[in-house]
Image (cartoon, rainbow, N blue to C red):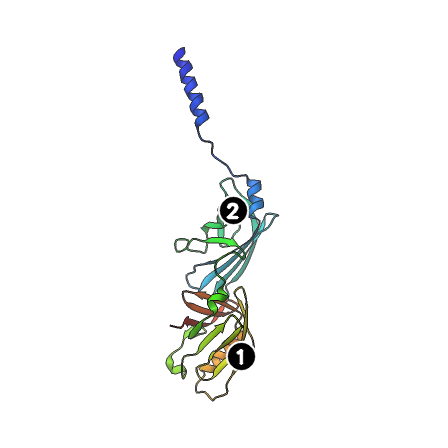
Amino acid sequence: MRLNYFILLLIIVFACKAPHEKKTDVGMLTQQVIGSYEASLPCDGCVSIEYQLELESDSSFIEHIAFLGDPNGNYEVHGKWYAEVDSTLTLNPGRLAYKIKVNANGTLTITDAIENHLEKQPAVLSRTGTSGMDQSVLLNDIWVLEAIDNIEISDADFRERPQLEFHKVDGKVMGTTGCNRLNGTYATTGNNINLGPLLTTKMACAGKGEAQLTQALSEVSAFKILNLKLYLFAGTTEKLRFRKAD
């Protein structure tokens, strides 16, 4: 009888010491994550995936997805989201993200994705306006033209390699079209860029290279800097690609 008593006592003691699994307060988590998030994600076959996720208080969400370099690469997806006790979010039906982990620092990590290769780079989403360096700071440099409309140029196409030089302090851009000098103004908002009137000298130039370049510049509305390359886009269509000058 005493043996049974001690066995029962041990069971009670160990049961009291057993750690209780801490479960997330789903209601609190739901309130904490409401907002807008963004990330620039790796992409096979395009420059990058520019991703924005809006989590609304009515449990609806909107995914804004831009496959930079793809002329038909803009998508907007609407659906419903819900939080779970393991600090994850489920999006239904998400196009890019399906399962998302909520991190203690306020970021989100896509753990189950449809169109992103997670093994190449963690797909971490930051609240809009808090992620990374302002790309306009990186733009403040000299860039040498490599391609127009995704077609590599050659030295035979121009008298000299076209260049653009951006000055963030005064919003000025200058350079060469490969034949004539160029100067003007520019302004950026996020990854959008507005090239103001660009003036060039009027020397006669052989070939079609200069005309193709100036036409492409007139269509540019967005930019992206990645791996020391400057990409200029019309929507999601790549118009010009430059490399950072040595």
Give the number of the disc on residue 170. none
Residue 169, position in %: x, y? 52, 70
Q: CA distance from mark 2 to mark 1?
A: 48 Å
| 194 w.r.t. 209: above or below | above
Q: Residues within 10 Å of mark 1 (few under 14, many from 20)?
A: some
| 144 w.r.t. 104: above or below | below
125 lies left or right of 246? right
Q: Nearer the viewer, residue 3 or 59?
A: 3
Three-letter amino acid code of the residue under disc 2: Thr
Give the number of the disc on residue 198. 1
Q: Residue furthest right?
A: 58
Three-letter amino acid code of the residue under disc 1: Leu
Per the image, label 1 sits on a secondary structure element best described as loop
Residue shown at 45%/53% (left/top)?
Answer: 123
Residue 111, position in %: x, y? 45, 49
Residue shown at 45%/71% (left/top)?
Answer: 141
- Disc with the residue nearer the chain's start (2 vs 1): 2
Residue 7, position in %: x, y? 40, 17
Q: Can the viewer see residue 192 in this picture?
A: yes
